[in-house]
Amino acid sequence: GCEREMTARTINLALLGAGEIGQVHAETLAQHLAGARLAAVVDPLASNAERAASLGELNRFAQKFGIQALIDRNSKRYHELGYAHAQYSDVRWMEKLIDEPMLLRIPLTRFANRLTIGLAEPEWTSWMQG
């Protein structure tokens, strides 16, 4: 068969959440995704990054996946705040996610208009292959 020549492509990734697990995600990306470049790091703690996720950026993910998909119901912060039985509107959940970025499922990854939530290595690889 005919082999298709692949050109080297760089995929710029933003890491939302640079704490302990965020560092694991960054290492995973660097080790397993050829051409990946960590272009931005966002974390709620100033010591980890410069700013939290913007409302506009989170809205992109919410429009594609729904607000509920952004909430990490297994996170320590979710349980600390007692949200197991919370019945908030999508607007209120978005406010909570802006105020409490530790509630976000990470990594939130964007490549051009393509988005993923959580580890999605097969999809990231497909982005690299064009």
Image (spheres, rainbow, N blue to C red):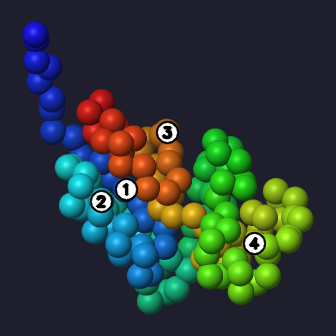
Q: Earlier in the sequence, mark 1 or mark 4?
A: 1
Quadrant of the image containing the C terminus:
top left
Q: Which residue is mark 2?
A: 29
Q: Which residue is mark 4?
A: 96
Q: Earlier in the sequence, mark 3 or mark 1?
A: 1
Marking on residue 113: 3
Kind of residue indicated by mark 1: Leu
Say if mark 4 contacts mark 3, CB within 8 Å: no
Secondary structure of the residue carrying tag 2 is helix
Q: Earlier in the sequence, mark 2 or mark 1?
A: 1
Cα–Cα span, label 4 and label 3: 25 Å
Q: In screen coordinates, is 74 left or right of 130?
A: right
Residue 55 coordinates in the image, percent (x, y)? 66, 61
Mark 1: give few (<14), some (14-19) or many (20+) Cα within 10 Å: many
Mark 4: give few (<14), some (14-19) or many (20+) Cα within 10 Å: some
Q: Earlier in the sequence, mark 4 or mark 3?
A: 4
Secondary structure of the residue carrying tag 4 is helix
Secondary structure of the residue carrying tag 1 is strand
Marking on residue 13: 1
Cα–Cα span, label 2 and label 4: 28 Å
Residue 117 coordinates in the image, percent (x, y)? 53, 53
The answer to whether residue 6 of the structure is visible from this angle is yes
Q: Earlier in the sequence, mark 2 or mark 4?
A: 2
Cα–Cα span, label 1 and label 4: 24 Å
Cα–Cα span, label 2 and label 1: 9 Å
**In the picture, residue 40 is in which quadrant?**
bottom left
Q: Residue at x 15, y 32 (%)?
A: 7
